[in-house]
Amino acid sequence: MLCPKCATQLPELTAACPKCGFCAAEVDNVLGNQAATIEPIMDVAACLRLADRNKLEALLDDFERRFPQVHIALFVGVLPPPLTPATAGFWLLNHGVRIKHGKRRDNAMGILILIEPTSGQAGISLGYGLETLLPTSSLTAALQAATHHLQHANFGAAFRSIVRAIDRLIRKAATSRARGAPFVPVTPKPHHVPLGLPQHITRPAQLPPKQVKEEVW
Amino acid sequence: MRICALVTLGIYAGFGAIGFATDEGPQHLPTWTEDGWQAHMNAADPSRRLGGLLWPDGAEAFYVLPQLREGSSADSPDLAQPPADLTGFLPPSLIRASEPRVARMSTPADLQDLSADAVTAAYDSSPDTLFIDPTYQLTAHERDDMERFLSFHDRDAMITAYVLLIGQHEKLPADFEAAKLVQGGLLKENRCLLVVPHGDPQRARLFFTSNLHRDTAPVQLSGILADCVAHGASASDPQEQLHRLLVRLSIRLFWLENVLRPATKLTEVPIRSVVAADLPKTQETKPQVTLTPSVMPTTVTEVSAPLLVSDAAIRDTAVQPVEWLALFGLLTALGGFALFRWRRYKMRHYEWYLPDIPTANPRLGGLSSGGAGAWINFGRGQSI
């Protein structure tokens, strides 16, 4: 795990970054401790065209229909100087409320894609439930694939590219079944067993032990 | 105004003069007309009329340039005396055209079988070889001429003609099999074989494949051979005999093609190498009719049984790689379309559920997220 502020490797169960002292309270001092509403598309900077917005709404609907456990939101806005997309995403996922069909979604299964057009930064923030399924290297590759669109301020195309990449990543890790079929508990795929788990979490017996570098922060 | 009036008067005066000259009529034009005296003189002396009064009096009507009457000069050869030797300039057939036509007849008693080596050479000839000369009766240049002529005929005709040239005192052996000739090239439809002794066209034999023989009256086929032999025998030079015979054969094959076209659907079979699968088939089925010239009449066409090859066999061998490529492309396109449809259906009607794995431990005081994820600085193009 890496610190969202200084990218320092964090030990398990740490309450603050040992190097920079970053914690949730530090962001709360800037943005407040109140709850915030998370919309699927939060275009605070008004950078998205209407056509892009319509396409993104359809794309996000399809995404959440295919993955009922996951919700995704897009954010484009100018952040105040102490904040970065990583710290803002950290705060939004911890204080945001996503309501769909009258029910509050669990932000632990949330994905937040943020673009800060002024500083030229883009990022993806994940909840706790998706950390082990979406490795940092894959997310970085998804962001870099959209670099061309980001550099040309085509944020609609950039969002679509990133969402499709995340779609492919989750489909590899998840198990498909026809809509309306009876629910069957999903067992993890062998090659998507969470890597780099804490020592107290046992690995399934059928898998050989692997030594893989931890890639999440 | 005065100038304009003068110009207008001048124009009217010019048109008036033209109109006056036109009104005089064609009888005043300076054309020659024959008066009565000239007509009388022309009737009395026709040579004078031929001259049209153009020659001077006393000149001959048919005037020939004097130098052509005189003897040959250094620059102009004497046309009245042909040169002694034209063999290097004209073909022998034209030089000997004035000679009496003598058709040489061979005696059946001195005929010998074609040697086994020659038969083998004829069997092993390339299927593209239309003129087969296993005993080398012709020179290479003459052989090329014949081959070129037959190839030219085959390019436009539906019926391919093969010619087997043997010696004047040779005949086909009793065990000769036409089916093996040119590596089985005669096993296809629309083929004919002319066996002709060099310098003895009366002993020529003409063989047709079964499809041609089936749809044509025997009299018509024998008429073709009789016509070709008659044209070949009209020359005394063996080379010219062969040339005339082949030219006539080409013409008669075109006629036969026109006769057969409405009745029989002549399939244009391209000249290709004989498929190797045909040869064992030929060897397994022995020919039922052996070609023995000594027992056959002069102008009878004959067809050997193995020459009958089904259309299906030819069609199987005619499958080109392009057809396989087209089939492969079609199947690939169909497979790709089916895969696209299945993927589209799955994306609309399927759901994906994540595996039941334990979540990560909370950190940094976050309830739902510990700040995991990735971000890049696209302004610098580097990941942070």
Image (cartoon, coloured by chain):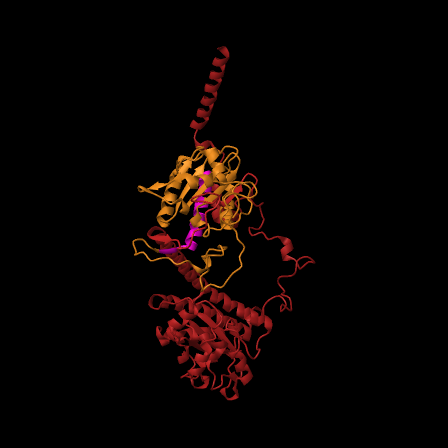
Extreme residue in the top direction: B1
Q: Which chain is red?
A: B
Residue B3, position in %: x, y?
51, 12
Extreme residue in the right direction: B74
The answer to which of B244 and A65 lies nearer the viewer is: A65
Residue B294, position in %: x, y?
45, 86
Quarter of the image with the C terminus of chain B is top right
Which quadrant of the view contains residue B24? top left
The answer to which of B13 and B103 lies nearer the viewer is: B103
User: Residue at 55% of width from left, 81% of height from top?
Assistant: B118
Which quadrant of the view contains residue B336? bottom left
Magenta stretch, main secondary structure, is helix
Is A186 drawn above or below residue B12 in the view shown? below
Residue A134 seen in this snapshot: yes
Region in magenta:
A155-176
The answer to which of A107 and B118 lies nearer the viewer is: A107
User: Residue at 36% of width from left, 51% of height from top?
Assistant: B347
Q: Which chain is orange?
A: A
Residue B138, position in %: x, y?
57, 75
Is B317 drawn above or below residue A25 in the view shown? below
The answer to which of B121 and A152 lies nearer the viewer is: A152
User: Residue at 44% of width from left, 28% of height from top?
Assistant: B22
Extreme residue in the bottom direction: B109
Is A172 drawn above or below residue A18 in the view shown? below
